[in-house]
Image (spheres, rainbow, N blue to C red):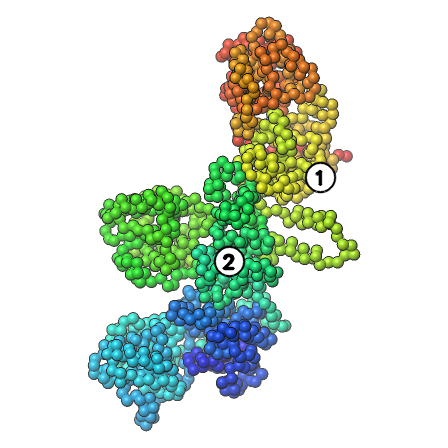
Amino acid sequence: MKLLLDLQGSQTESRFRGIGRQTRALAHAMIAASRGHDIHLLLNGALTDNLDELLTEFEPLVGLDHLHVFQAGTGVAERDPNNLWRTRAAELLREAFIAELRPDVVHIASLFEGFVDDAVTSIGAFDVPYKTAVTLHDLIPMADPARYLAEERHALYYWRRAQALKRADLLLSVSEYSRQEAHLLAQIPLDRISVISGGVEPKFRHAALSPAEEGALRGRYKLEKPFIFYVGAVDPRKNVELIFDAFARLPAALRASHDLAFAGRLFEEEKGHLRALAARFGVNAKSLVFCDHVPEDDLVRLYGLADLFVFPSKHEGFGLPALEAMACGAPVLASRATSLPEVVGRDDFLFDPLKAGELASLMEPALTDAELRAAMREWGLGRAATLTWARAGARALDAMEDLHARAQAEGRPAVPVRAALRRKPMMAFFSPLPGDHSGIADYSAELLRELARFYEIECIIVDTVLDDDWLKANVVMRDIGWFERNAHLYDRIVYSIGNSHFHQHMLGLIQRYPGIAILHDFFLSDLIDWLSNTGRIPSEEFYRELYRTHGLGALQAERREGRLVAVDRFACNSVVFRNATGVIVHSRYAIDRATEIYGEGIAGMMHEIPHLRALSHDLDRTAARARLGIGEDEFVVCSFGIMTRRKQSRKLLDAWIANYGAGKVPGRLRLVFVGENAAGDYGKDLVAEIARHKGRINVSITGFAPTATYRDYLAAADVAVQLRTGSRGETSGTILDCLAARLPVIINNHGTAAELPDDALVKLPDVFDIADLAREIERFRADAGLRAAQGQRAAAHILAHHHPADVGDAFHEAIETISLEGRGEGERILLRALADFNAPVYPNEFDFRSVANAITSNKGRVGPRQILYDVTVLAEQDAKTGIQRVVRSILARLIESPPPGYVVEPVQIEDHFFRYARVFADKAYNVPAAVLPNAPVEFDKGDIYLAIDWVPDRLPQAEGWLRRFRQAGGKVVIGVHDLLPMQMPQFFPPNMDDQMRRWLEVCLRTADQFLCVSRVVADDVVRYAEALGAGDRHADIEVGYFHNGSDLEASLPTKGLVDGAEKILKALKARRTFLLVGTVEPRKGHQQVLDALDVLWQQGADVGLAIVGKIGWMTTGIAERLNSHPELGKRLFWFQGISDEMLDLVYDASAALVAASAGEGFGLPLIEAARRETPLIVRDIPVFREVAGAHAFYFKAENGQDLAAELQRWLDLAADLVPPSKGMPFLTWSEATDQVIDAVFGRRPYRTVQLRPKA
């Protein structure tokens, strides 16, 4: 292993402190125990004060060729903002220099350098093949930023170094405490941190002094009395105030006989502070001795002379002065805080850093009991002997060897041929950021800390007043204009998208600059509604997005139930799924909802990554309760978030009242709703209910809770209750906050929260009883141990599944996977290739259009799968025939309730291909479908073409389109109402049989399925299809059938009555009127029925005949006869083109329906009549038997005389002998549509057309 040790920590101001000594000592130890590794040293040519000294010191150990001095210029110290460019340049120069040395591992002994001098330390300015290890001393400023990072320049410097620390491959921690601190504060995984401990240099050892030497030493530092010694700085964390407080508590004689000696570089202001402390605690100022900076040789002797060394620090990374004092033979007392117990190793020599009395109680015997003092010296010498730099160096080499072995196992060559020096990928990141009042802002700030390990990040912001020092230090901020001018510079574009105005600019940008979307809120309807209502986007855009995402049914629901309902119910997020290269979500719930809308294929572009959340490390329960006025003995339940019906706040209140409203449970109990109350009646009702129980329960509503208040309640709470209903796919960050605060959390099993593991929190059923909630709250109240155990399980879940570093790794993997494989990446490469190659002929417009069409076809479409419903005839002119009624009825039901993952799109044939029939849909359904144009249909695998209508003259024109549709993975379903023109050509115009044959042959070449209106027709189709064959087609065709519905009101019925309707209906009811419904054409038997009625009229029967049907074909004779009939308008009525509303009234006024057709595909009028319990008189043909069964009077008649006899026979039957249509089975159009859906989506087919190629 080639190991490069960066020793700048021994060149800077740190050389005068412990870090400088540790840097050199650890280097010596690793060189001494090199184990055959190739060890090189790196020094900074700009730090010249002791450069020659270091070169001289290390040349005999490693050789001159292993000493490397890099040049990066001067004037790079970060405290001067004018140096910023030079600082960044120096970092690049250093890393480039290191890359040329081709090390396997670089070790940085002191990363936090370069603020006051020209040290240059960085990690990850380039993407390099070597690994980096860093000695971790402490993260004290990170733990207390208010105190140590109040000055902006220093804060920016520190957070840049802290981010570099996160990029390190290995941390060598000087203590277990610092290891855990890095894990909690910087979210660095524990498996990247090894504890090497610190050590003490050999020179720090007990030295016996002659009386003369001791006298000289005491004289130099004015130490006339025995003294209590302290070495180090005197900033607040060092807690030197405790020494004065404890010293003042000692007996007067003991105080008088001892001095307090302070060694270290102290400014006069700091000495003044110590004198003030002495005065405050009544310590004689003459007892204070300031030794100032002490050379190491003298420091060793002073340690040995001290009667007692006291180290009261509240926070240390290691605590080297305590170890040095023990090594030199001083009796040592240290605080029981942070890393110091690891150093001292004995609890009886430790004290609480907040309790001066405890320290005093240890100091007095240590100063008065010589035997105890000797024992303390002996313990210290033995302890120091175990904490050596040789031990630390060996541990450091162990850890770096393991790091190197892992790197080789990952496939990196043991010795790279050449160090590849690459820039990290550039990322543009769109998101609200701290300073914006958005939960996503805080989330993104945390995520960026992790992503910055892998990318150079620039945040694109709008009007954000940034309030985050880490972001200021590590991320460049750009505006949208800059991004649009320079978008080509970015390797990755990421949009962090939510359902609020903070994301308004992203929806337009992602369409022009596709990128990866982190979709925090599955619903974007509120945002798009707000944008369209405020004029930020065209008002029609809401309808476009509603239509694109959810289809015509959603437009219909919006018109029927209102805009607010539509916003609440529909996600409106296709703008993301259509344009993003990939989508990252936080829950399986979001993937499932996307699959419901867009089909199974959408899951391929989605990546589920949990929310990141670090365990809370800074929550102080006692302090928080004091600030909030909550007693230590109170049991506190909190519910966090705005109080709304969706949060079920009232149910929580009711459960609290059920438990504690009667005052029977002892103790002080408090329920706090941490957030704003709901507006409107719901909020008023909550307040009124609380007031009604005033004096018996303690319940409060905080109103808006700033972050500090919110976190205080997290610290103060005993239990959290977070309920939901009506989820729209959002992931609750609040629940994770509660778990991270180690709180027991009660939820109901709803939405994304249902995905949390059962042991991490307590789950009630989705729909729960108040008693169940009350019982769980009381269970936690009664058992503090249960609360603690549940809190630990909560913390374990956060660590295992939401740790920021792990989540950051998952994001990096997903982003890189999407960038390599995501939607649109291949297209971008293709477009660049198309633009780059040369050809002798320049392409023309047709060439460009052809290529564009091919690209569109090849890439597929993102959106719900489509049922392309053919309305060609209906869109051009509603013929108002029975077939048209079927087409309208099924279309209406499909639009209203499409199959999961599908939307229904009416389409029409135009010039050999299909267009969307949106203008038709707009008019027919009174929905704003025309916000999208009648564009050519885009299709993809899984789409379905469904032709319920019969378009014999137009479908052959679209045969080529249908073939391409099937080849792309679409399914062609052709509805068949009958084959009568082929079966009974005598009843149809000339050539109609040929037209139907040609139509059927096209269908046989293009269809995957025939969907017939009856079993009889299905049998006919199989027979004729197998007779005709299908050329060279090999695939069989499924054949299914359904029955028509009969509820006119569900078929988008037309409205309006004919002139004189009331008089006409009265005439129909005045006698027993027979009704014929259907187009007037020879097959329907109108001539025969009229012949029969003429016979009955001649015989004196007072009966009527009502004919409802437009004139059809081959009707010259019957039309003239009807129009000139003497009974016309008296007992004979012919209604042409009447509305469904009028038809309904005619049915009700008639005595019986006569169905005299020689052939039918179904016989819809039979069903319509039976729904009104109108008796049925029908010709005895197979399809009528299928439809009506025993519920009709059947006749066989060759002529009018025969039919007249049959009608008279029916008239002569007693009422109870007439076959009743009541009870006849029939379907609603909704049920009929369900049959259609069942047949199309995989129900076993009724029959199969077995096709064989023609010889």
Residue 169 placed where, x, y %? 51, 69
Is 388 or 534 nearer to us in this picture? 534
Residue at (55% x, 60% y) in the render: 428
Residue at left 51%, top 55%? 496
What residue occupies the far left of the structure in this picture? 252
Q: Which residue is mark 1?
A: 960
- The residue located at (64%, 43%) in the rendering is 938
Residue 610 horizontal side relative to residue 1194, left or right: left
- In this rendering, does residue 197 appear at all? yes
Q: Amino acid at mark 2?
A: Val
Residue 1207 found in image quarter: top right
Q: Please give the residue where the numbered disc 2 appears in the rendered image.
A: 462
Residue 745 at what x, y percent from top left?
37, 52
Q: Earlier in the sequence, mark 2 or mark 1?
A: 2
Is residue 902 shown to the viewer in this render? no
Q: Are marks 2 and 1 in contact (CB under 8 Å)?
A: no
Going by the numbered disc 1, the residue's amino acid type is: Gly
Find the residue positioned furthest to the bottom: 212
Q: Residue at 61% of width from left, 60% of height from top?
A: 488
* Relative vertical location of residue 454 with respect to residue 499 in this rendering, above or below: below
In this view, the residue in front, 524 or 200, is 524
In space, the residues marked 2 and 1 are separated at their CA atoms by: 50 Å
- The image quadrant where one finds the C terminus is top right
- Secondary-structure class at tag 1: helix
* Up/down of 956 relative to 803, above or below: above
